[in-house]
Amino acid sequence: MSGKPEGNLAGTALTEEDLKKKDLLREEWSETGLSYTWSAGVAIGTYLEGLKEGRLLGVRCRPCSRIMVPPRLFCEECFRTVDEFVPVRDTGTVNTFAICYIRTDASRQKKPQLPAVIELDGASKGMGILHLLGEVRPADVKIGMKVRAVWKPARERRGDITDIRYFRPWEPEPGPGALRPKAKKAAKPKSKPKPKGKET
Ligand SMILES: [Zn+2]
């Protein structure tokens, strides 16, 4: 078979020389000196302002009663504009996660990053944000584990998702009316004590 693509397939066939020289990918960057400013929009703009104040916001759509995070202005299920911003909690549940030992430039990192999708408490089921996990060993991360946001100090927050440093494992404290597990009674021995004098 020749190295040429068959039929009318578009593209350029690689030569042996290309493979030897590894001349396969090319990146070209030029410093333009341009800077950009753009509006985050009402929904995400309000969300980012909330982060600066140390709170997470969602939006509520009344007809379907969903609370969506991150906020958006339009309910894709009801085909209508949402009704209001509502606070959600900074605690949640790990929905899914990854253990990343490789950086975006394909170099290795010893301490892996742990990106996770976190379903936030107070939002509708399945509504969550992508963030990092911290204060946890990769082997201990589980889908369904409860986590809580670790915020930057107020003076360091600037209306950015990194105003939350990461989410760490967290156990909810039982409320005042919650049943506390009863202290276990000392287990009675099931078998009768051995008759004395027969131990060797
Ligand atoms: Zn809706």
Image: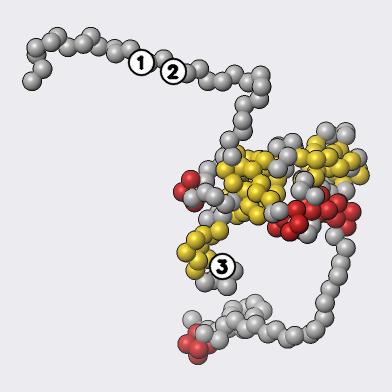
Discs 1/3, front:
1
The quarter of the displayed image where residue 76 is located? top right
Q: Is residue 33 left or right of residue 2?
A: right
Q: Nearer the viewer, residue 81 or 31?
A: 31
Residue 125 visible here: yes
Query: Looking at the picture, does residue 24 appear above or below residue 93?
Result: below
* Position of residue 142 measured from the top left corner of the image (x, y, whole percent): 53, 43
The amino acid sitting under disc 3 is: Arg
Reading the image, the residue beneath label 1 is 187
The amino acid sitting under disc 2 is: Lys
Q: Does dot 3 land on a helix, a strand or a loop?
A: loop
The amino acid sitting under disc 1 is: Ala
Quarter of the image containing the C terminus? Answer: top left
* Position of residue 73 measured from the top left corner of the image (x, y, whole percent): 88, 48
Reading the image, the residue beneath label 2 is 184
Q: Is residue 117 left or right of residue 80?
A: left
Q: Nearer the viewer, residue 99 or 181?
A: 181
The quarter of the displayed image where residue 185 is located? top left
Reading the image, the residue beneath label 3 is 103
Q: Does dot 1 land on a helix, a strand or a loop?
A: loop
How far apart in space, not on screen, are marks 3 and 2 (Cα)? Answer: 48 Å
Residue 126 visible here: no
